[in-house]
Image (tube, helix red, strand yellow):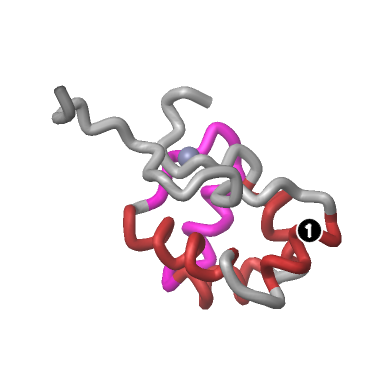
Amino acid sequence: MPDCRCGVSDWRGLREALRLTQEEMADRLHISVRQVARLEHPPHRCPREATIWFLRHMLRHSPYRDRLQAAGFPNPFEEDCTPKRVTGRMS
Ligand SMILES: [Zn+2]
């Protein structure tokens, strides 16, 4: 998903791996349930930076981090700590 800024290709799978309801997910990401539902409808429109920040923060800590591992769901923020965005300002 080269045009996916948030790095999460499967929002529903992610939420299910976290064993959260849409309401709980919305609460943790500080967005509305409708926005969660929309994210789970591929192809999604990537959420705002703030939302990704909350998600990233959440997945870095237990129990969510452990739940992802237990579910065998790849942590979208695990493999590297560098921002996925390329600003193009480096040269
Ligand atoms: Zn995305």
Residue 42 lies in the magenta stretch: yes
8 over 1 or under it: above or below: below
How many neighbours does mark 1 have within 10 angstroms: few (below 14), some (14-19), or many (20 or more)?
Answer: few
Most extreme residue toward the front is 91
Residue 46 picture location, percent across and down: 42, 43
Left or right: 76 in relation to 47: right
Residue receiving disc 1? 69
Quadrant hosting residue 51: bottom left
- Residue 36 part of the magenta-drawn span: yes
Residue at image point 71% right, 70% down? 20
Question: Circle 1 sits in a helix, a strand or a loop, which is it?
Answer: helix
Q: Position of residue 31 (x, y in %)?
A: 43, 67
Q: Is residue 90 left or right of residue 73?
A: left
**Which residue does the image show at 54% across and 70% down from the upper left?**
58
> Quick one: 54 or 78, which is closer to the camera?
78
Q: Main secondary structure of the magenta part?
A: loop
In the image, the residue with mark 1 has its CB under 8 Å from the nearest atom of ligand 1: no
Q: How many dots with numbers?
A: 1
Name the foreground residue: 64 vs 37: 64
| Amino acid at circle 1 | Gln
- Identify whether 57 is placed above or below 8: below
Image coordinates of residue 2 in percent, x first then y, are 47, 23
Residue at image location 59% in from the left, 35% down from the top: 42
Residue at 60%, 42% in the rendered image: 41
**On the rendered image, what quadrant is the C terminus found in?**
top left
In the rendered structure, the answer to whether residue 12 lies left or right of residue 87 reads right
Picture coordinates of residue 62 (x, y %)? 67, 76
Q: Which residues are magenta?
A: 30-47
Q: Quadrant of residue 4?
A: top left
